[in-house]
Amino acid sequence: MEDSTVEQDFETLPVVSFKDEILAAVKNNQIVIIIGETGSGKTTQIPQFFADENLLGGKQMAVTQPRRIAAITVAERVSNERKSKVGEEIGYAVRFDDKTTAKTKVKYMTD
């Protein structure tokens, strides 16, 4: 996927327009439930918002996916968006395959 296509996709995701409100809600509340349509950017963008705002406090964020291929594909997409390699800042862990390091901030995994 070309970088320009990834950037266009990112900019058109509905969740991006709610970034400030999501971050404010997370900073001001112990529990936040975010509901959105499939394809709105919940899985790919919200973890990046948290990582970019240092809301992880040096810890890893786990994002569960129902299937191995989903966890791997999403990790690859987000790494591509961030112009990094899978296993660095963004990684995944599925049965018999762990692509994470000590630097990994967001870890996509099967539940």
Image: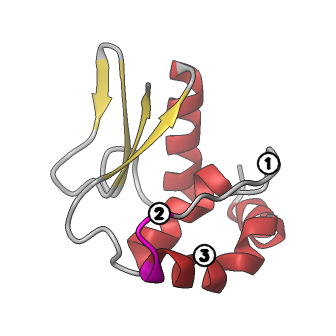
Of 24 and 76, nearer the camera is 24
Q: Residue at x 48, y 36 (%)?
A: 64
Give amino acid for label 1: Gly
User: Nearer the N terminus, badge 2 or badge 1?
Assistant: 2
Real-space Cα distance between discs 3 and 1?
Answer: 17 Å
Give amino acid for label 2: Ile
Circle 1 packing at 10 Å, graded few (<14), some (14-19), many (20+), is: few
User: Nearer the N terminus, badge 3 or badge 2?
Assistant: 3
Q: Which residue is drawn at 65% across and 59% down?
A: 34
What residue did someone put label 2 on?
31
73 displayed left or right of 14: left
55 displayed left or right of 24: left
Identify the secondary structure beneath mark 3. helix
Identify the secondary structure beneath mark 1. loop
| Residue 39's disc number | 1
Q: In which quarter of the image is residue 70?
A: top right
Identify the secondary structure beneath mark 2. loop
Mark whose residue sits in front, 3 or 2:
2
**Where 22 falls versus 103 (above or below)?**
below
**Image coordinates for residue 29, horizontal then vertical, percent:** 46, 75
Mark whose residue sits in front, 3 or 1:
3
Real-space Cα distance between discs 3 and 2?
Answer: 12 Å
Q: Which residue is drawn at 68% across and 63% down?
A: 3
Mark whose residue sits in front, 2 or 1:
2
Give amino acid for label 3: Ile
Which stretch appears magenta? 27-31
Q: Which residue is drawn at 40% across and 45% down?
A: 86
**Cβ–Cβ under 8 Å for marks 3 and 2:** no
86 displayed left or right of 82: left
